[in-house]
Amino acid sequence: MIQSCVSGKRCGSGKTDRAGAGVNGMVPQWRSLVDDAEFRATIGPPDEPVQWSQDLSVQSATLDLHHQILVGCLNRMIRLRRTWRDSLPAVRRELSLIINYCKIHFFIEEAAMMKTAVPAAAYQRHRAVHRRILARMADAVRAFHADPLTFPFDRTLHFLRAWLVHHILEEDKSDLGDRLADQSAVEAEIAKYRYAEICRKLKLREESVGPMPETALVNRFTAVVHGDPVRRAALVAVLEGRRLHVSQAPDVASAEGLVDAYAPELLFLDWSLPAAKPFARYLYCTRNTAVVACHAGDPAEILDVCEIQGVAHILPHPGTEDTIVQTMHEILDAFVPLRALVLERAAGGA
């Protein structure tokens, strides 16, 4: 069952052109860039992940990190390219993460521009670019939801790749790069922003004021797959105490049937279990089940591999009840990619 995702067995009709009329509109704006040989060399072949380098730096640790996180989202999309019709849940999640994280990133980037006194004309021009990018991403999301199997995946991926590299190399570096190089006070200010706060300001969730209400978790379906019976029981107790439906299993083999029977939205997975990694990848590709890797150590130790496998979050052991609940809220929001969540938590963000 797990191998079907990894092997890349194809399904569907193979048609790619019918849906996405709105996405078609974003191609001409980038055509001159995409057709330019020098620019194609910059963004690289379509199947090759984008490599971060100092050439992409805008002289801001915060904004550089945002760009690296977006590059990570793009690279996961690139890895899905040859088998994306067998991985529709993964495509859906990545599209949601990209557009929502772009909104957060643009909010902070525009705040940095205002704090560094970028000329009004340049600020408005840059802000208009952000609005156009978000509009085209919204078109892509709508096209996917309208008919996933005929979603123009390659064109959307090409747009994302061309936009991200071009926007950083040309627009961000031009409008912000030199200004941020010696603006330590501004850097300190934008580093203070927390994702939950920005989500509320941008009204990315319906509850625009205050934290997500406790009732948001009630009656949601979750699962715990853990080899340690004591830790498994502790997790189950927290989840049931919040009135979630909880199913549990001691190993991956037992968990496969559990996922088919209950279709949990969240699954806490003991990362030390045999086959944990391919199981996480299988769920990422084929199920609308977000995986939380449970790890008895520093999350940074497994962050890179979890990011590649499509894990939504990492829960260190021992995790307090508050940390477990916060982790669930952050995943259900689906606004912030894994690396951003882990690094913010490590920095003490709420």
Image: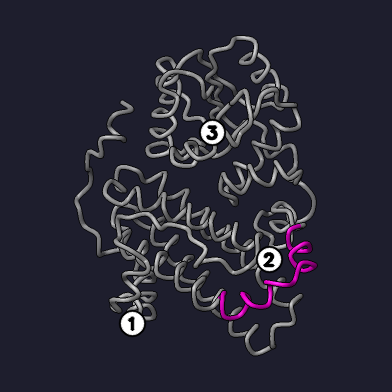
Give the magenta-colored segment's residue range.
172-191
Residue farthest top in this picture: 229
| Residue placed furthest toward the bottom | 121
> Where residue 148 appears, x then y in whole percent?
34, 53
Q: Which mark is residue 108?
A: 2
Q: Is residue 252 above or below residue 154?
A: above
Q: Which sits in the foreground, 27 or 88?
A: 27
Mark 1 vs mark 3: give the one in front: 3
Give the CA distance from mark 1 to mark 3. 40 Å
Return the disc, 1 or 3, that comes first in the chain's sequence.
1
The type of residue carrying mark 3 is Ile
Residue at 77%, 46% (x, y): give it: 211
Q: Quadrant of the N terminus?
A: top left
**Mark 3, residues whose alpha carbon is within 10 Å: few (<14), some, or many (≥20)?**
some
Pointer 1 residue: 32
Please give the label number shown on residue 302. Answer: 3
In the rendered structure, which amino acid carries the disc numbered 2?
Ile
Quadrant of residue 215 within the rendered picture: top right
Mostly what secondary structure, the magenta segment? helix
Res. 324 image quadrant: top right
Q: Where residue 72 sits: x, y (%)?
A: 48, 52
Q: Magenta segment: does it hold 163? A: no
